Image (cartoon, rainbow, N blue to C red):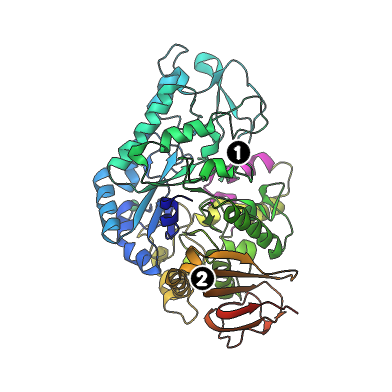
């Protein structure tokens, strides 16, 4: 880690999916002024940075991840003037703004692509990949071939995602220049960092089986972020292809590439062959093992890592990993404790802090996500409706995209008119107002948890050590620095007997536990500040 990465360890990030966060003008769509209204709510939680999913001009085939103008704001979200007020209001509260940077593809409505598709000799032709025939059998993440036939010039173009998201050709120096220009545009306006969408896909090897990790990846990343002008910003790469071998190249303190990346091994647990719509039996021990593995890799290599369970592409964590009914509070608080006291930067996704669960519907008409709808359409002939909808309810990205529920009022206080996607179906029971005023408040627990994390450098700079040993059904780890030592004990679903030979003081618990030893109830967790740590488990 370089000095800057060490500083970034103090960040706590809250992700906003603007379309579904807060509508300020009653059109059923969240917007930038809505975000401003809720900054105090976010600040109060103990957050000091916001990752904003794309808010640029877009026809919304993929809710803003298909950008038609990188340097302007989506009409439905507001104006550049609104955006400037928003970043000012954030900075006033010492909250950093991390924008989403989509470098791999544009919208097919972007002027570059509109030009590009016109003729083979158009000056923008080489901004994208065109070929007489598909160059390989790559599949689009959203189903079907990644090559789309285009009549105008009788050629195919590459799209790793939706048909309306053509991949940019980074081999073209003009593309590289345009994209560094985009970064500079926002940095000049005061942006503090970028979350970089599928960044490891920008360099391609057409002979390889996978779309990512091409031969010029590091050169391109360095070009974007290794420049002195942007050396102060925070960058986190969405790099599905990051592994133990290349992680140091991407995030090493001397590399001038990324501050950090997201790790997905724990997210892929429970997905059959990586498919989010096909549930696979798992136990939380599998999730723990994935976390332990990456905590160790990152610590051993002195790299900065990220900590998250949720984002706008994933189902709600309590529904997938724990219990979203009678143990909802315990599940939400235990998962948070397990994740966010590890070493790395916490990322909280809107609604997670009030224990929001998955959305359930047996009607495909209630879904909006292009990935979900494509999956439904390509499987509805072969798979029974019941089974298909079960899979969709399990894994759909729309699980996390329903409007944030602020109150039990009309449309959950999100909007005064019908939202663009059905209102979250449990909003009367699960909403910010009810949660904050409840005795078992997930939000208030998050506040305590983040305050605890901030109170001791042991949680930030300290050493991480997994001490679960051979015990199943639990995750027990230690964070220590100099003379300070904390033990985090998270129990999974069963009644579990845990005995530790430790003297200490309970500094956080999601029950009213008075002794660290003994039987743990389902999803119970405890943080102990201790003096002696000889662990002896029964
Ligand atoms: O996602 C990339 C990606 O491959 C997955 O996270 C994807 O969401 C898919 O569901 C995997 O099954 C990023 C963005 O986070 C996502 O929202 C965009 O749709 C995608 O890139 C294209 O920009
Ligand atoms: Ca609106």
Left/right of residue 431 with respect to residue 363 in the rendered view: left
Find residue 219 and report its horizontal and vertical position in percent. 49, 31
Outermost residue, top direction? 121
Crowd around label 1: few <14 · some 14–19 · many ≥20 (10 Å): few
Q: Which mark is residue 141?
A: 1
Region of the chain picked out in magenta, as a range: 361-379
Residue 56 position by quadrant:
top left
Q: Residue at x 59, y 43 (%)?
A: 242
Residue situated in front as seen by the camera: 16 or 294: 294
Picture coordinates of residue 410 (x, y %)?
39, 66
Side of 411 where 78 appears, left or right: left
Q: Which structural element holds mark 2?
A: loop
Q: Secondary structure at mark 1?
A: loop
The image position of residue 26, as x and y in percent, is 32, 56
Q: CA distance from mark 2 to mark 1?
A: 47 Å
Dominant SS type (magenta): helix
Residue at (29, 52) in percent of width and height: 87
Q: Is mark 1 within 8 Å of ligand 1?
A: yes
Quadrant for residue 418, please give it.
bottom left
Q: Tell which circle, 2 or 1, labels the residue nearer the N-terminal end.
A: 1
| Residue lying at 50% horizontally and 79% vertically, measured from the top left | 440
- Report if residue 318 is visible in the image: no
Residue 28 coordinates in the image, percent (x, y): 38, 54
Task: Return the residue nearer the eye: 59 or 496.
Answer: 496
Q: Is residue 107 left or right of residue 396?
A: left
């Amino acid at each position: 880690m370089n000095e800057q990465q060490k500083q970034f360890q103090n960040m706590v990030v809250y992700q906003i999916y603007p379309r579904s966060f807060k509508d300020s003008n009653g059109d059923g769509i969240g917007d930038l002024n809505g975000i401003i209204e809720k900054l105090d709510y976010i600040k109060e939680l103990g957050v000091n940075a916001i990752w904003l999913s794309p808010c640029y001009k877009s026809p919304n085939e993929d809710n803003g991840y298909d950008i038609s103008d990188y340097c302007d704001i989506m009409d439905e979200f507001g104006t550049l003037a609104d955006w400037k007020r928003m970043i000012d209001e954030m900075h006033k509260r010492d909250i950093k703004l991390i924008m989403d940077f989509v470098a791999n593809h544009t919208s097919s409505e972007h002027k570059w692509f509109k030009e590009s598709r016109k003729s083979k000799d158009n000056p923008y032709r080489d901004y994208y990949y065109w070929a007489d025939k598909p160059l390989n059998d790559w599949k689009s993440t959203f189903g079907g071939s990644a090559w789309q036939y285009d009549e105008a010039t009788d050629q195919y173009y590459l799209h790793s995602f939706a048909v309306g998201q053509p991949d940019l050709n980074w081999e073209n120096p003009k593309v590289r220049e345009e994209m560094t220009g985009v970064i500079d545009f926002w940095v000049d306006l005061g942006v503090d960092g970028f979350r970089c969408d599928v960044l490891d896909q920008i360099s391609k090897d057409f002979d390889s089986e996978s779309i990512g990790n091409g031969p010029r990846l590091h050169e391109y990343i360095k070009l974007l972020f290794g420049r002195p002008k942007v050396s102060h910003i925070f960058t986190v790469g969405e790099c599905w292809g990051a592994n133990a071998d290349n992680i140091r190249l991407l995030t090493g303190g001397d590399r001038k590439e990324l501050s950090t990346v997201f790790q997905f091994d724990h997210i892929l647990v429970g997905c059959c062959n990586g498919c989010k719509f096909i549930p696979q039996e798992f136990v939380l021990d599998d999730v723990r093992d994935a976390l332990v593995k990456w905590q160790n890799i990152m610590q051993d290599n002195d790299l900065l890592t990220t900590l998250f369970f949720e984002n706008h592409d994933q189902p709600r964590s309590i529904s997938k990993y724990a219990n979203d009914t009678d143990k909802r509070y315990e599940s939400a608080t235990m998962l948070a404790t397990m994740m966010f006291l590890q070493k790395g930067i916490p990322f909280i996704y809107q609604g997670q802090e009030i224990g929001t669960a998955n959305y359930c519907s047996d009607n495909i008409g209630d879904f909006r996500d292009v990935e979900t709808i494509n999956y439904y359409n390509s499987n509805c002939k072969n798979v029974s409706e019941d089974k298909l909808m079960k899979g969709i309810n399990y894994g759909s990205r729309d699980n996390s995209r329903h409007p944030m529920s602020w109150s039990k009022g009309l449309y959950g206080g999100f909007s005064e008119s019908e939202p663009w996607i059905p209102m979250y179906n449990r909003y009367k029971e699960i909403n910010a107002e009810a949660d904050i005023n409840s005795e078992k408040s997930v939000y208030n627990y998050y506040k305590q948890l983040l305050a605890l994390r901030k109170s001791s450098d042991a949680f930030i700079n300290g050493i991480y050590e997994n001490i679960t040993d051979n015990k199943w059904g639990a995750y027990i780890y230690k964070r220590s620095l100099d003379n300070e030592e904390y033990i985090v004990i998270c129990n999974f679903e069963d009644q579990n007997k845990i005995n530790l030979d430790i003297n200490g003081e309970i500094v956080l618990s999601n029950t009213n536990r008075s002794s660290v030893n003994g039987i743990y109830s389902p999803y119970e967790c405890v943080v102990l500040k201790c003096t002696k740590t000889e662990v002896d488990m029964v």
